Image (cartoon, helix red, strand yellow):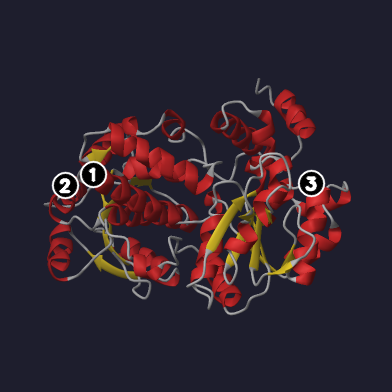
Amino acid sequence: MNSPDRKETILVVDDTSATLEVLQRTLTAEGYTAYTAASAVDGLNLLDGTAVDLVITDLKMPKVSGIDLIRHVRENYRNTAVMMITGYATVASAVEALKSGAEEYVPKPFTDGELLAAVRRVLDKLRLRQEAATWSVPRAEFAHGLIGESPAMQKVFASIRKASSTSATVLITGESGSGKELVARAIHYSSDRASAPFVPVNCGGIPESLLESELFGYVKGAFTGACDSRAGFFQTADGGTIFLDEIGETSLSMQVKLLRVLQDKEVRMVGDSRARNVDVRIIAATNKHLESLIQSRAFREELYYRINVIKIEVPPLRARDGDIPLLVRHFAEKFASELGKAVPRFSEKAMEALQNYAWPGNARELENAIQRIVVMSEEEIIEVPDLPSFARFSVLRTTGVHRRLAEVEADHIRHVLANTGGNKTRAAEMLGIDRKTLRHKIAQYHLD
C-alpha cells in the first residue's frame, strides 16, 4: 500500500508521441509521477523494474495490443490497476477491455477533467483493494477501543488528550451508536484517575422513580423495602469518573439534584439528613440537542453550562471518510476469534457496498452487521450477496454529486426507518428532528 509521502505512479502506454506528451504533462501537474512508453513492449520493460500504481494504455498498438497488455498486467502485477483510452471506441472493444481487467474505459477525445476523474476512481479502487488485503489493525495507534484514521476522528483523539489532562466536566454529543461511551472511557483511562472506578449510568434506562436512589444511594428505612443502607453510583465512583449517558432524558427535578452535586461536590443519600463529600469527575453524554431542550424548558440552562465545560462531538460513521474498512477488519477479527473461525476477507465490491451505506446506527450497527456475517457465512471471501439486504441495495444507489438534496434526504430517512424497524420515535431521535417533522417528511416523500 502506498505510504502517504509517496506520489502515486502512473505509466502511460501509447504509440502516439503527442498523446504521451499531453497526458504526462496533465498527470504531472496533478501531482502524480508519470512515465511514458511508446509501445506495450517498452511498457512491460519499465514495469519489470518500476513500481507502478496505474497503467493507462491505448487500445490499438503495433505488435502487442492494449488488450494483451491489460491481460498481462492483471495476471502478473497484483498491485497495479489498468485503464484504457482509445480513439476506436465501440461497444465490443469496451466489453473486451473490461472483461480483460480494465477498471475504466475512456474514449477519445476526452477532457483533462474526464481523464483525471477516471484516474482518481481507478486509484481509489486500487487503494480499497489493497486495504482489503491488509487484515491486521494496529490497535496501539488507537485510543482505548476507538478506531479511526479519518480527520474527523483525529479531532476526537486530540480532544480526548486535552480532556484527560484535566478534571473538568465533559459533555459528549453524537448520534446513537457513534461511540460516546468509548470516548468517555478513553478520557478516564488516559487521566490520573485511571486506577479508580469508571461507572457508566444509562439515565434513560432507569425509571425516574428509581434514578435518585440508584445515583445517590439510600439509608435503611428510607422507603418500603430499604432493609439495608446502600451506596449509590456516585459513592461507587468516588475518586474516579461517573459517566451519565443520555443525560437529556433526566427530569427537571433530577437535574436540580445533579446541579447540586456539581456545585457542592457532595451527595445526599435518600432518607439521610446529612450530605457526604465525593470526589467524582462527571462526564455526560447525549444524542439530543440540549440547546433545543433548554428553549422548550425541558433542560435546565444552568446545568447545561456546568456540564458543557469541555465539549466533544463524536462524528457519525458516514462522516468518517476511510474508517469503515478499519472497523470492518477489527470487528471481523474480533468475532472470528470469539467463534474460533478464520477471519473472512471482504471483496472489493462488498467493501464498496459497506462504504456506500449510510449506517444510521453508526459503528454499533456496523458491528452488529459484521457479527451476523461472521456467524452466518462459511466463505473465506465475503461477497455482496453475503451482506445484509440493506447494504446490498447500497451498491445500486447513486452516489454522485448530481443527486438532488430531496433525494438524498428521502434516502437517508428511509434507511433510518428501516434500521429502527419503523419506530418513528427512535428514528426521529437518530435524525435529530421531532416526530411531527418526521411525519411531515414521510408524507412528503411517500415513505409509508
Disc 1 packing (10 Å; few <14; some 14–19; many ≥20) = some
List the single residue furthest toward the top: 448
Q: Residue 293's x, y, as percent?
A: 81, 49
Position of 252 compared to 212: left or right? right
The secondary element bearing badge 1 is classed as loop
Residue of label 3:
251
Check disc 2 and give the amino acid type.
Arg
Tell me which corner region of the image, top left, top right, bottom left or bottom right, holds residue 403. top right
Mark pair 3, 2: CA separation: 68 Å
Evaluate if marks 2 and 1 touch, with contact meaning CB atoms under 8 Å apart: yes
Question: Which numbered dot is residue 238?
Answer: none
The residue at which mark 2 appears reads as: 71
Label 2: which secondary element = helix
Give the percent coordinates (x, y) of residue 400.
54, 43
- Judge whether residue 85 can be spotted in this image: no
* Disc 3 from disc 1: Cα separation: 62 Å
Viewer-nearest of labels 3 and 1? 3
